[in-house]
Amino acid sequence: MSTISLPTRIRFMNPTQCFQHLTQAALGHPTVLFLTEKDAERLDLNPFIEAMKASGQVTWNKDVPSGSAKSTCPESVKPYFIPEHALIVAIGSAATLDTAKRCAEGQKNTTLIGVPTNCDMISILSAPAFDQGLIVSDFALRSIPSITLAEGMNALGCATDAYWAKTSSRAVQCWALQSIRLIIRSLPKVLLNPDSVSDRQQLTYGSLLAAMAFRNSQPAVLTAFSAVLSAHSDIDPGLARVLFLPNLLRHNLGALTNPESLYEAFNIDNPEALGVWIEKTAQGLTSLKLSDYGLTDTDLDAIADRVVESEKHANNPVPLTLEHLKTILKLHL
């Protein structure tokens, strides 16, 4: 893929700058705010919300997911009215940001501003992208460890999928490798010491590079696994994306022109070591067994069928048959 697309204006801000920017942007526009009540309390955002309301017509949609695996519009949000020329502001986790984007689909003359409260950059840049992404490091310091894990793993999976996709490019591979390096080294440190500002920044930069790479390479099989599994169970999409990385790394090794660079980025010397790293990093926060999410052999057969139907597996550098996919899935039952 020769064309590089970075459609979102990314700005790093402190909380005061962020609130001033959003309040100013809301002047003269009907504004729709996607933010859970819990996140508003946790991040002390209620004074800001009142200031936004005072500056114009603001409708606060609290009925959005924060850490749920399901990021589609809830039933109560589907008929939600978003007027033309509206400002749409989404503050929260990947699930909240993705919900806002889905609810805005089909709306004309709207501006979307996303404010992730963790390390998620994938939701900001992936299509349909936000017009602006405001990154506030202070918000991430109060994030929930399970969401940090899921969003960090999601970025890791996106970066790797972009690296070896048939539609990848030299620029995408450079971004992906640096993204993997940063995430592998910073994610365990952040989970161990959530107050480490420098490690949080490294994790955010790694996620941003993953989003840039993912945006500029068509989705591959890890994306299909993530979408289908999270639609059929309560597993987080980020965990569903990264779960099969070691299996696909081994499957794709023969097609990689420089596998050593990927090994170096992951800080491993074999695919099994990557699996150990994933399990160790997730230990105590979540289960990586598909059976713990209520999935059975029969479910996995149907999920493999859906992955094939999505045709995203065709972007993998080494062909993947239906039997390959079933085998990979059942290794994690």
Image: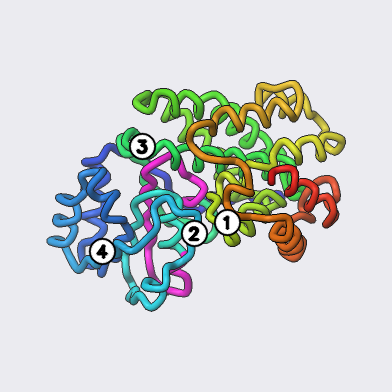
Tell me the element at label 2: loop
What is the spatial separation of the Cα atoms under label 1 and label 3, in whole angstroms? 24 Å
Residue at numbered disc 4? 60
Could you tell me the amino acid type at mark 2? Answer: Lys
| Residue under the point 48% across and 45% down | 121
> Do residues under tags 1 and 2 come within 8 Å of each other at their CB atoms?
yes
Please say if the residues under marks 2 and 3 sit with CB atoms less than 8 Å apart.
no
Label 3 packing within 10 angstroms: few (<14), some (14-19), many (20+): many
Distance between mark 4 and mark 3 Cα atoms? 22 Å
Task: Look at the image and give the residue range highlighted in magenta.
Answer: 102-124
Quadrant of the image occupied by residue 231: bottom right
Cα separation between marks 4 and 1: 27 Å
**What residue do we see at 56% from left, 40% from top?**
287
Q: Which residue is mark 2?
A: 70
Q: Quadrant of residue 289?
A: top right
Q: Residues within 10 Å of mark 4 (few under 14, many from 20)?
A: some
User: What mark, if any, has residue 140 been given in the picture?
Assistant: 3
Question: Real-space Cα distance between discs 4 and 2?
Answer: 20 Å
Mark 1: which amino acid?
A: Ser
Determine the CA span between mark 2 and mark 3: 21 Å
Q: Looking at the picture, how far across and down is residue 201, in whole percent? A: 42, 30
